[in-house]
Image: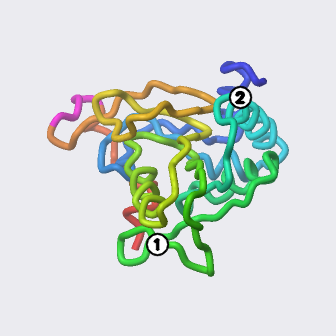
């Protein structure tokens, strides 16, 4: 497995770890943003991280029938983990602001489903996936991500998250920004804000 230092080196090398003033897809503000799409644009480097995450997933979840990833950030990581674990992998997409299964994807009744994301901050996208799984009368086996940047105060997920790397980055509500963050122009990189 990759060490946290080597993983951070890969994130920096691929410009996947950005610094500035960001509004995350959760609506919270942060001085750092993990853009896993940048990491995944270097498949030979992302492969090392995916293999390391897959080992952790195998160790923590004995039975997985299906992997579900929220679009768009989770699609590639879901695909890669599904390939390594030899599991069917599907994704959901936003339709009028809500996650839906499209493209003929279905979740059959009684399956054990693992939700995979690129980055988990509040777990909002993952919890939207949970609704799709429950609606299909299946079970959430757990949650996994390349990066877990959640904190107990804002995290909506109550189960353990299996991540390749845990990164602690403070997040702030709009009305509670630190002075130095107020001085930096805002970037909104998250997909939830895109029209």
* Residue 176 falls in image quadrant: top left
Give the mark toward the camera: 2 or 1.
2
Give SS at disc 1: strand
Overall secondary structure of the magenta section:
helix
Find residue 30 and name its label: none
| Contact between labelled residues 1 and 2, with CB atoms less than 8 Å apart | no
**In the rendered image, the vertical position of residue 13 relative to residue 187, given as above or below:** above
Relative to residue 187, is residue 71 drawn left or right? right
Quadrant position of residue 105? bottom right
**Residue at x 38% of width, y 45% of height:** 22
At 59% from the left and 72% from the top, the residue drawn is 106
Instruction: Please name the residue shown 69% across and 60% down the image.
Output: 89
Residue under label 2: 59
Residue under numbered circle 1 = 100
Give the CA separation, mark 2 to mark 1.
Answer: 30 Å
Q: Element under label 2?
A: helix
Q: Position of residue 96 (x, y in %)?
A: 36, 77
Magenta span contains residue 179: yes
Residue 78 is left or right of residue 169, and the answer is right
Q: Position of residue 178 (x, y in %)?
A: 23, 29
In this image, 141 relative to 65: left or right?
A: left
Question: Is 26 covered by the magenta stretch?
Answer: no
Which sits earlier in the primary sequence, circle 2 or circle 1?
A: 2
């Amino acid at each position: 497995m990759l060490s946290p230092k080597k993983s951070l080196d890969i994130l920096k090398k691929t410009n996947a770890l950005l610094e500035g003033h960001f509004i995350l897809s959760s609506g919270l503000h942060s001085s750092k943003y993990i853009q896993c799409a940048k990491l995944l644009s270097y498949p030979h480097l992302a492969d090392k991280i995916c293999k390391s995450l897959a080992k952790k997933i195998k160790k923590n979840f004995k039975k997985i029938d299906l992997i579900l990833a929220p679009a768009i950030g989770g699609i590639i990581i879901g695909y890669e983990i599904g390939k390594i674990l030899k599991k069917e992998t599907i994704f959901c997409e936003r339709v009028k602001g809500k996650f839906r299964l499209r493209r003929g994807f279905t979740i059959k009744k009684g399956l054990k489903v693992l939700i995979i994301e690129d980055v988990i901050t509040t777990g909002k996208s993952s919890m939207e996936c949970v609704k799709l799984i429950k609606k299909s009368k299946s079970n959430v086996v757990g949650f996994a991500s390349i990066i877990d940047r959640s904190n107990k105060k804002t995290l909506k997920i109550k189960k353990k998250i299996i991540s390749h790397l845990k990164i602690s980055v403070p997040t702030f509500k709009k009305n509670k920004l630190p002075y130095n963050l107020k001085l930096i122009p805002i970037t909104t990189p998250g997909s939830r804000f895109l029209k």
